[in-house]
Image (cartoon, rainbow, N blue to C red):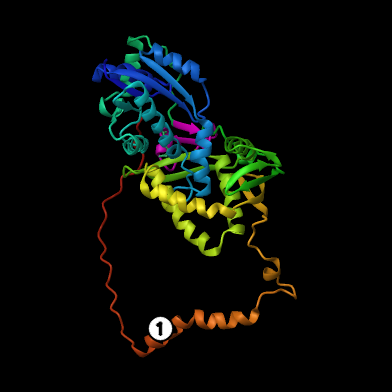
Amino acid sequence: MTERIVLAYSGGLDTSVGIGWLKKETGKDVVALSVDVGQGGEDLESIRQRALACGAVDAVVADVKDEFASEYLMPALKANARYQRQYPLVSALSRPLIAKYLAQTAHRLGADSIAHGCTGQGNDQVRFEAAVAAIAPELKAVAPIRDFELTRDKSIEFAAEHHLPIKQSKKSPYSIDQNVWGKAIETGFLEDPWNAPIEDLYTYTKNPAEASAEGRDVVIAFEQGVPVAIDGEAVTPLQAVERMNELAGNEGIGRIDIVEDRLVGIKSREVYEAPGAVALIAAHEALENLTLERDVARYKQDVENRWSQLVYDGLWFSGLKVALDAFIDETQRYVTGEIRLHLQGGRATVTGSRSTASLYDFDMATYDEGGTFSHKSARGFIDLWSLPSKIASQRNAAVAHPVETPQPVYVERSKNHSATQHREA
Ligand code: ARG
């Protein structure tokens, strides 16, 4: 049997041409795999048919939206996961799941390699290949655009020459990746970080300036860190994300515009919209404020940051990430209760929280007379708490060493190139 490659197939121009291109470059048969993580648009069956029409020997589709929400988005929510404190890891979360299905399909259909349509400049190539390396180390990875110089022009030419059934609608100048957790938009005029995003980019969110003046309230119920009901109606993890995308998107919540540190070393300008993710994380964090012990909450912030970096960096299946998951799951034991959010004008504001597992003690917290907090104990506590500082201060005064401060050396910097050069995606 001819050797086989399983290609992650989106149905777009690049991966459609990728089928024939891989065959030409490697001599191997290509199996197309399309994994639906909620990218919207076309139905899976027409994508499958197109793959076959483009020369795939087999084409497989999988709707994994529920698995994506339960096994990938919920851990991210429990981790309040954001890279650079803002980006909720939209694309980074889908790659390991797609990689898992690539590996499974390769095993099932006897392929020795997997392939993807990423360029050599981004994070996604690393995520696909690092994930496959971790779960199916015997598989090889190839990327037609990166490894066999499949440029955009060559793609268009190849598609025309071989009469591939691809609608060549006017090419969007942006590189877009989307799933149920949100949408990532890059390249085009956004490559100049001074250029403001335009309204056309956004499809998950209304313009906050045009959203309703009064906004709306929503109550989200969580059980052990996972949303289980919205406004009293039971939801699955996928339904929770979809419903919050709609509610928060309508109020213009979740637009993010950052200069991001990519794993491959460059900075890139990224625009995202993730209304459900932003609103759910705000609610989840508020419930943690009510239910986590102080030291657990403080320590968890470091874990969240590290978790987000690992996932951003393509290390979903790494030992450290898995170990941090165990820590995070343990912290969620009492994260059960309800949060009221007010959604309005691009913001999700927490306006109420309650939980049967709350650590908030009204009698301790009240400033009214009759509170149970021991004001007397506070004095003794402060005496001992500040004792090390007091002793050190006395020592410093007694042993006064003027420390010589080194002077900074100033070097003339060459003129910076401005970011006006333009390149098509
Ligand atoms: N920069 C983001 C990330 O690394 C988004 C990547 C989106 N991918 C794409 N092909 N447009 O997660």
Establish if 377 lies above or below 124: below
The residue lying toward the viewer, choosing from 110 and 193, is 110
Which image quadrant for residue 318?
top left
Which image quarter is the N terminus in? top left
Counting from the top left corner in percent of width and height, residue 55 is at 35, 13
Residue interval drawn in magenta = 176-200
Q: Dot 1, how many residues are within 10 Å of its Cα: few (below 14), some (14-19), or many (20+)?
A: few
Instruction: Name above or below for residue 378 compared with residue 196.
Output: below
- Of 12 and 127, nearer the camera is 127
Q: Position of residue 238 (x, y in %)?
A: 57, 35
Front in this rendered view, residue 38 or 403: 38
Q: Is residue 273 visible?
A: no
Residue 8: % across, % down: 38, 26
Is 101 within the magenta? no
Figure quadrant of residue 126 = top left
State whether residue 352 is above or below residue 196.
below
Q: Is mark 1 within 8 Å of ligand 1?
A: no
Residue 411 shows in the view: yes
Q: Which residue is mark 1?
A: 392
Identify which residue is drawn at 39% across, 47% down.
310
Numbered disc 1: secondary structure:
helix
**Amino acid residing under circle 1:** Ala
Farthest residue, direction bottom: 398
**Residue 282: image location, x then y, percent:** 58, 49
Which quadrant holds residue 110? top left
